[in-house]
């Protein structure tokens, strides 16, 4: 469970801190380019470090310079939290790097579990070498920016447990797996989808032809030459029974319906994630559907005690379903760097709670109060 995240010189975040309460559902709001997606990215990288070395995530020396605030020579991302409600273990995990000279960056991964500390240097380092609570807290993280057209695509998967990818591909095999392995969860997912998009009757999956690109190689005079071959395979696609007709293929289904179905497939998966990072959560959804989606999120969080959801949004309807302590307002200083405050840090919050909805409060106050009095820099 995440409790605190600190970003230092990570893109537009010179020094930002987020403290998460026990509600396990949090929104990041703020103008375009205020640094919301960057927060999700920083956490996504940290979670990937739970199973992969730095070099797989940052590709040696290529990305540090893009992720570090331009002109700065060091960067760190630190998260702390705990695992276990009865046998609570506190942990802290971070990745950092420092520039040696123009092309050389020195990376470090470090961690603390209760009182034991550890760190590893170099691009081979990862958090998977740290003890129990850190990998288990971070490994089951999902980061999504779903694209409706990818969700709708017919897909072939030879994975034992297929899953929805960052961009939404892989939905049909994931749903098929869910229907076979956890029919009760599939049923629940269907009921939740119907609440957000009332026109839906039933979710189906059918077989479909899919063109799959495969890498092949042949040996010519002792040398291996690789080439790509397109093969037609039998995959799967989503079909929905709607109130307007049956077995409507996914590509003809509305975007908001597909996006909601994608989110629910991730959240209701038998290997449930612990941390879900969602970029632009309301995309394609009608205000009523946005509110219903939040209600569904709250229910899913109640069922899964280890789940936290952090999302970015531009929608006051989404924010309306939260209380001020769940909303993080991001804004830029004059020089463009990110400052963040929780909406409950606003001086008028007690008055607002009795008078306005959370979305109205945000709408009325905007983001300028977050940087008021800040010396730019
Ligand atoms: N290396 C860097 N150094 C300084 N600033 C950077 C660096 N990389 C990116 N940025 C800034 O961070 C911004 C990216 O912010 P981000 O994508 O997190 O915004 P966002 O709040 O998600 O915006 P939107 O609502 O438009 O999606 C860029 O627009 C750029 O100004
Ligand atoms: Mg963004």
Image (cartoon, grey):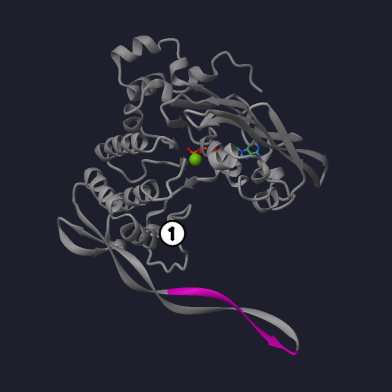
Residue extending farthest to the front is 87
Q: Secondary structure at mark 1?
A: loop
Q: Which residue is mark 1?
A: 169
Residue 196 in sight in this render: yes
Main SS, magenta residues: strand
Quarter of the image for residue 202 reads bottom left
Residue 24 % position (x, y): 43, 31
- Is 203 displayed left or right of 127 in the figure? left
Q: Identify the residue at image location x=26%, y=45%.
A: 192
Residue extending farthest to the bottom is 221
Residue 37 % position (x, y): 52, 39
Stretch of the chain drawn in magenta? 211-221
Which quarter of the rendering shows the C terminus?
A: top right
Q: Is residue 142 above or below residue 165?
A: above
Q: Nearer the viewer, residue 122 or 134?
A: 134
Residue 299 % position (x, y): 31, 36
Image mark count: 1
Quarter of the image for residue 326 reads top left
- Is 357 displayed left or right of 334 in the figure? left
Q: How crowded is the residue under tag 1: few (<14 C-alpha within 10 Å), some, or many (20+)?
A: many
117 inside magenta stretch: no
- Is 229 displayed left or right of 125 in the figure? left
Q: Is residue 189 above or below residue 218?
A: above
220 inside magenta stretch: yes
The quarter of the rendering in which ligand 1 is drawn is: top right
Q: Identify the residue at image location x=60%, y=31%.
A: 91
Residue 71 in sight in this render: no
Residue 296 % position (x, y): 30, 38
Q: Identify the residue at image location x=42%, y=60%.
A: 170
Q: Nearer the viewer, residue 368 or 129?
A: 129
């Amino acid at each position: 469970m995440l409790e605190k995240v600190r970003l230092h010189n990570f893109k537009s975040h010179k020094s930002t801190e987020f403290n998460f309460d026990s509600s396990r559902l949090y929104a990041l709001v703020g103008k375009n380019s205020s640094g919301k997606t960057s927060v999700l990215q920083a956490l996504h990288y940290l979670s990937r470090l739970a199973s992969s070395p730095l070099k797989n995530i940052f590709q040696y020396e290529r990305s540090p310079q893009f992720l570090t605030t331009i002109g700065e020579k060091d960067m760190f991302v630190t998260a702390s939290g705990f695992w276990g409600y009865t046998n609570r273990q506190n942990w802290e995990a971070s990745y950092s790097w420092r520039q040696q000279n123009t092309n050389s960056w020195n990376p470090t991964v470090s961690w603390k579990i209760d009182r034991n500390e550890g760190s590893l240097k170099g691009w081979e380092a990862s958090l998977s070498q740290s003890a129990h609570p850190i990998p288990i807290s971070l490994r089951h993280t999902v980061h999504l920016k779903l694209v409706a057209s990818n969700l709708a695509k017919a897909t072939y998967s030879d994975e034992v447990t297929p899953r929805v990818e960052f961009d939404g591909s892989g939905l049909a095999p994931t749903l098929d797996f869910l229907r076979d392995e956890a029919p009760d969860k599939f049923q629940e997912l269907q009921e939740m989808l119907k609440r957000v998009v009332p026109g839906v009757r039933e979710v189906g999956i059918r077989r479909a032809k899919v063109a799959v690109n495969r890498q092949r190689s042949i040996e010519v005079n002792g040398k291996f030459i690789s080439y790509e071959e397109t093969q037609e395979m039998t995959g799967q696609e989503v079909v929905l029974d709607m109130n307007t007709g049956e077995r409507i293929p996914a590509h003809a289904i509305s975007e908001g319906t597909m996006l909601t179905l994608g989110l629910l497939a991730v959240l209701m998966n038998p290997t449930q994630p612990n941390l879900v990072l969602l970029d632009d959560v309301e995309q394609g959804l009608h205000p009523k559907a946005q509110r219903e989606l939040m209600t569904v999120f709250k229910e899913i969080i109640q069922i899964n005690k280890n789940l936290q959801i952090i999302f970015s949004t531009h929608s006051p309807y989404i924010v309306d379903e939260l209380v001020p302590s769940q909303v993080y307002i991001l804004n830029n200083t004059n020089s463009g760097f990110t400052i963040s405050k929780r909406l409950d840090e606003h001086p008028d919050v007690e008055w607002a709670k009795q008078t306005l909805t959370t979305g109205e409060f945000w709408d009325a106050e905007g983001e300028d109060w977050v940087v008021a009095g800040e010396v730019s820099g």
